[in-house]
Amino acid sequence: MAEEDRKEPSAGRELVIGRWPEPEQVVRNWQEGVDLYSGIYQHFMEYVPSVRCSGSDAKVPEEEQAYHILFQTLEWFLFGESPEVGFAKLEQNNTTSQLCGRVFKGGETTYSCRDCALDPTCVLCMDCFQNSVHRNHRYKMNSSNGGGFCDCGDIEAWKTGPTCIKHEHGASEDTKNPASQLPVGVAERAHELFAVLFMYVVEMLIWAEDKELPPGLQPREKTDSYFCVMFNDEQHSFDHVIYSLQRSLGCSQKEAQNYTILIDREGRRAVKDGTLLLCQETKLEIFNITNSVFQSPLRVEILHSNVVFHQAFALRLLSWLNQVIGYSAGLRQIFCEVVLNQPPGSDQPCLISKLMLADTKLWKGARKIFHELIVCSLLMETEYKRLFAVEFITHYKQLQLEFVEDDHDRNISVTAQSVQIFTVPTLARHLIEEHGALRIIIEAIIELFSEHMDNGKLHFQSYSQEKLLRKQMVLYDLKYVLISKPPVWTDRQREHFFEGFKTFLRLLKSMQNMEPVSRQIGQHLEIEPEWEPAFTIQMLLKCILSMVQEWCASDEQVLLRAYKECHRVLSQCNNECSQRNARKQYNTLTMCGHSISLKRYLVSRESVSIHLPLSRLLAGLHVHLSKSGAINKLEEFVPSSEFHVEKLMDHPLRCIVLMAQVSADMWRRNGFSLVNQVYYYRNVKWREEMFDKDIIMLQIAASIMDSNRFLIFILSRYELFEVFSKPPVARNKDVIQQTNVLIEELLHLIIMVVGERYVPGVGQVIKDDVTMREVIHLLCIEPMPHSELAKLLPENENNETGLENVIHQVATFKKPGLSGHGVYELKPECLKHFNLFFYHYYKSQQTKAEEEQKKKKKQANSDEALPPPAICQFYPTFAMVVNILNCDVFMLILRTVLQRAADSIGQLCSEAMVQKTLHLICMALQEEQRQLEGVIAEEDVTFEVYLKATRMGSSAVNAESILSLLEKLKHVHQLDAQKDMIIYTLQMFDVVKKLREKSSPGSADFEIQRANECVQDKDKAERKRKADAAKLYRQKIMAQMSTMQKNFIESNKHLYEKVTEAQKQEAIITEVDSIPLAADSGVSLGPMQGATAAEKILLTCILCQEEHEVKTDEMAMVLAACVQRSTALTKKRSRIVTNIGDNCDPIIMHPDLGCGTHVGSCGHVMHATCWQKYFEAVQNSTRNRVHVELSFDLENGEFLCPLCKALCNTVIPVIPLQAHSLDSKDTETIADMLTLPRWLENVLARINGLNASGTKEEENSLVQVNPVSWKNPVEFRSILSFGVQSPVMYSKSIVEMLLLFATAVYRVGLKVAPNEADPRVSLMAWSACAFTIQSTENILHDENKVLFGSLPDRQGVSLKAVLQFAASQRVVTSAKVIQKHLTRLLSVFVPHLDVEDNWSFLDIDFFHLMVSLVLAFPSLYWEETVELQPSDISCAFNNLYLFHLVTMAHIVQILFTSTTDCPMEQDEEENEESRSAAELYETLQEYTSRSLESKPYGWYLWNCVKCGITPFLRCSALFFNYLLGVPPPADLSKGPSEGQFEALCYYLALPTNLFQLFHDYKDTVTPLLQRWCSDSSVQSFLKGQRTSVCYPRERNQLIDLPEDYSSLLNQGCQHSCPRSSDDEPKNFALCMFCGAMLCSQSQCCREEVNGEEFGACAAHAINCGSGLGMFLRIRECQVLLLAGKNRGCFIPAPYLDDYGETDQLLRRGNPLHLCTERYKKLQQLWLQHRILEEITRNQDANQIISDWQQF
């Protein structure tokens, strides 16, 4: 509703509703009255305006109550009793219908069975499909445009399985009249009531007065209350309407947006209410704002409020009628009878026709309800469907004319109901037979296109694109009505079909020779002519022409009459052309003693048209005559005296000559429009009814004409007659080139006319043979996927290619890998069917196929000849075509070409001409061989190719024979590529010669085999000789090189030794000195820590290509890196991300790892200075490119890696590892002294001292803290006594890069502005380091890889760089800040530190804590005047004790949170670990006052701890390995085994029995346990008042997807948006991280984030993926990747069809199944943090510009 409507007080409504009479009283008054019509109208007049509704879906309760009372009154009248009782009786008596009739919403998934559906328009809803036999057939999935209905139960729609399980027991239409099943009196009352109500509906919806109501509805008093109503259109954009409403109404953007949504959905909307003057001002304001030169203003009308109220009620009444008739088939039949009833003696149409004729005047909402009522009533009853179809076809022309002028889409026009009528076979045939439907539809087409007529021909040079598209819709109706041929013809059917056929010929006549083109000479064409409309109509007519021919062919009488009429109309067209060229004289052309008289016509000088539908229809009918045998009766209908074959073939020949001349570049000045026409003329979508039919017409002519006269005719039209009849004359180079191309095209035409017989009716083949040949030739080009093959094959009227019927006979399927698609490869035995000059090849395809086949022959050590394959026989009608190969003119053409080639006249002959000539000679010899092998007497052989080719030519004195010319060609070097083919041709001559000499067929075959073997042996010997020679030459060269190398090494031995030694000492990337400093213990912590040598790193800069050794005191080398926030490790996606902003304290990571900071790198290295220059250069080059969309954001420091183009936003400095070694004696001494209690005392003293010195207090005033377990105080610097050393000093360059990277991590991780001085910089560095390690461990686990040795180099290098960076924070952050952080971190273990933090150990991720502690701990050694760091021994013990403390805390954490599912029975035996676990658990129970529930089984506790702590240990092993460089045990580099846990414990200096730690450190740990157990949050957890993370943490995976994609589609169909109540189609997207279903690109679910509007997916990604998102768009079957508001891309969904292909946008609709490998690849994309990289690469490659924020 409008805002003004919603502000009305409800009290007034309640008062009005309260005064309404009871429904029983109203009904009684109606029954007592004289006229029900007057009673109902009077009631509506009085009470409908009280509802005061303008048509919104957002109804207030009072409004709904008012409607309920109105409808309840009608229901009381209908049933004569309480509506509840009446409806219950209806349901009790009603039987379930066999028809489903579910009306589809827009975007709803429909299913069509390719095996059983009569045509593609026969579809099932999801429920019916799932419960039908078609689920196991070949089916297609499609998305409905809305308005259609489910065909389940319609026996005419399906060949088998017409009903699903749900409807198979429904009542059929053969049962008795449902109206008789109604309760007594209901039928009579329903008839009376429906008539009045529908009359009211029709009257109100077509009412044209704005300020008055119809008679009988006018109120007693007229008020000054009006609505300003805005209507939708398809011209103005959404944003434009919102802007206009904001300005004109002064409303907010949100209000204007709501108005616009309602206007778009309902078709109109009241945007203002008030007085007439106020509404007029608003209308004028909207007009002024929206009116412009380029666009018409928005349509706004001022309607009286009563008119609006009654029209809104009329729509609700329509919906009510639809609901009521749905209760009973009897009521439905009564309603149908009422709306189709025409008053006797009246010329007025019935009520349904009145409303149908006013369809274009209705707004969108009214149309939708009206059309749904038609579907649910008239189309559900067979008889009434027939009557409605009669009404529809009666008004068909007017409806289509009005639709063209309308601006609404087809799916909301009543004309869209044609598909529901014309696709019913019996109904369509009835309409054709009884009502002339075929004629009416075609006349409508002619009338619609009449405005494009020019001198009786269609001409589309100035047209409206939108209107033309609407006009073309009628062609679909013509296709629908022709879908099903009559099984038995009647005379009446013949007459009406023939009547429609003659009308169809009128249409084709207007297209014959339309839009002719003339060759541009001298000047290029200035304005490209429009050509697309004509070809679009031709494409739509392709199936129609084929179906018309099929209809004709189904009855011999119809076929002959249709042929006669088509010939008559075509002859008229030809005669009209002849009359225009009457002045032209006939020329007599003579060649080889044969003559023909022709009118002079030159394609290059005169106009020619590509559009010849009449000629091609006649050719198609002729083929059907040949196929059916009715050709023998043709003389009776078309006498031979009237059959002028030269005229019939002339126009198709001109068209083919045009193609040849375009290939010869003779029409290059005519621009691209002609090039495009020539391309589409042979394109698979058009060629069946264009190029193919032209070839057939020439074959028809060749089968009737004398072959010599036929070829002379062709030579004349090709303008080559003089070329072959006179000696060559000197010409310029361009003319010679053009002539050569024309000769090549001429030879190709002869090959096609004689050889292309794979058309049923032309050759003795069936449809599958044709398809098989097409597939073979496509696969000869290259292996192809199924979709590509299907795209290159012609489709029939049902969109089927027949590919599945033949593909397995000729090809084998090769399955796809992780990317790409499955392909079909041709079987070797099918290569023999390859025809190099296959007529559907484009030149590029032919070249590629030739290269591929020659390559295969070469690999097989065979000759490279590609002879013509054996072909099928012609039908008897076309048998004379082969005489072309035997005629004199043909021999002259061959001889001329070969003569010029043999005389080495290079300019006058081309290799392609020779190649095609050889092909033709072989074809002729094959035909002669076939005749010789098939007859007994030689005199019965009519073919004399051999004799004519071997004797001297008769056309020129002393002309050489063809055979002798071929012998000459063997020695022409320019034709070496054709040498194998020449030899093969000569062999064919030998074979025919043997047959001529009366050799037996077997003998002939033996001779052929011997000849072939002889030639092959010679070829193999020659190839072997050349191969051996090449091998010897290579061996000789290699021996010489080897000798030279040895001589050089001997003469420069000293240099070589130095280089070799240097190479041994240095590595390309990293190498460690081979001399160990201490024994390699395989332990990374404590006194047994293994030694590490100093790392030497040699790197090559990818920018300057200089090699550089990385040192800490020299120029920095940096890795290109990308820092990003990540939620890939958390399961708590509903939790709002809080760890961002200025107030965030990132010192502690929560155990759910809600959002971390990940660092990744492509591994490519640069000098820091080189990178800085590169980045500045990128900035400079893009600064002025304002309109260029970049895939990276320079303002945020982003750039593309110069080498791999990966997205980066910072660089990491490479820092080499320092040497570490422990002296065994010192280690033993310190180990005895520095126990954990002593170490903690030292740490505590140091921290207190640092705190005191920080407050400028004297050292002697320190407060000594004496815990119970630490009796003896220690001095402030006692920690230094265990070993210190000078820290590593870094160069200025490295320090700058460390600071740069630290700032980037801080900026991205916290989403704040850069601030180098912020104390959180170091915290974010440590957190990023820990999170990156956890991500790496997660990836290794997900891929089931070993912990060490399986990481890619780039990950290993970047991980090491991140760790060394995190350990170097002392150069980035001050010592005081890090010491403060350390103090806060240690407060988890040391209870007496003066800190304010009060963390619960349940809310701490202990790996993050451990990393921060280890990396911050060296800060305790820093002095104000001296820079110190702990020695290697001190580090070893510090790391050991820190790690042990953290490990024990994590064990306790696991015991508290992850031991809740204890089994009832003991499964394992008790051991030392289980007993220790039970003891510790008992202690914890004691400290928690028995709040911790009892766990009797120690083995279970041990298993929980072992499983829960393993990820922590794996991460710790990675951390210490990359931090210290200590090699791990071999077991950690092997596959998963039983010893992995033990190896981890050994490497990390842990006892295998982890509970031993609690025993060893009992005195120290006891107060910690007591403290942790007494924590309030622990107590709350034990009482069930809060939750905590369980260990091991559940590892993240993408959501589980169904195996069958149809299940996903069904899920999307069943889902309803909670924010929307309309039926508009929603584009649902499934979040693959959490499974949330979202409305993508929909107004209903847009959200405002930080003052900006985001689409549902983009808004969801902010919380769910910290800006990253992966969504499966269900209707499009594609994955949407999002990264922020400016980045996104589409990639294929992980679903493949049976042919191993994805189907984005569901264009093919084949059944799809989940590919687990590709889904795994998507999961790796997420877990490896490569979504951002994938988006950037995709955007960079595809340059897709989209507003990703709106998704």
Image: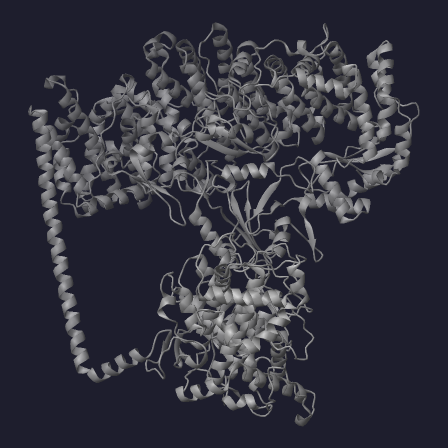
In the image, residue 634 lies at what x, y percent? 35, 10
In this picture, residue 204 sits left or right of residue 723: right
Q: Is residue 1693 visible?
A: yes
Residue 1588's place in the image compared with 31, above or below, is below
* Quadrant showing the N terminus: top right
Q: Position of residue 199 (x, y in %)?
A: 76, 17
Report the front residue among 663 and 1079: 1079
Residue 629 percent across, percent down from the top left: 32, 12
Is residue 575 in sight in this rendering? no
Q: Is 337 placed above or below 1084 here? A: above
Is 66 rendered above or below residue 704? below
Look at the picture and state if 1490 lies above or below 172.
below
Quadrant housing residue 299: top right
Q: Residue furthest right?
A: 221
> Which of the pair 28/1003 is nearer the observer?
28
Q: How many marks?
A: 0
**1596 or 478: nearer the viewer:** 1596
The residue located at (9%, 28%) in the rendering is 1004
Looking at the image, residue 1676 sits to the left or right of residue 1468; the answer is right
- Say left or right for 891 vs 1751: left
- Residue 204 position by quadrant: top right
Q: How is the image coloured?
A: one colour
Relative image position of residue 196 (x, y in whole percent): 78, 15
Q: Residue at x 25, y 25 (%)?
A: 872
For this rendering, which residue is in front, 30 or 896? Answer: 30
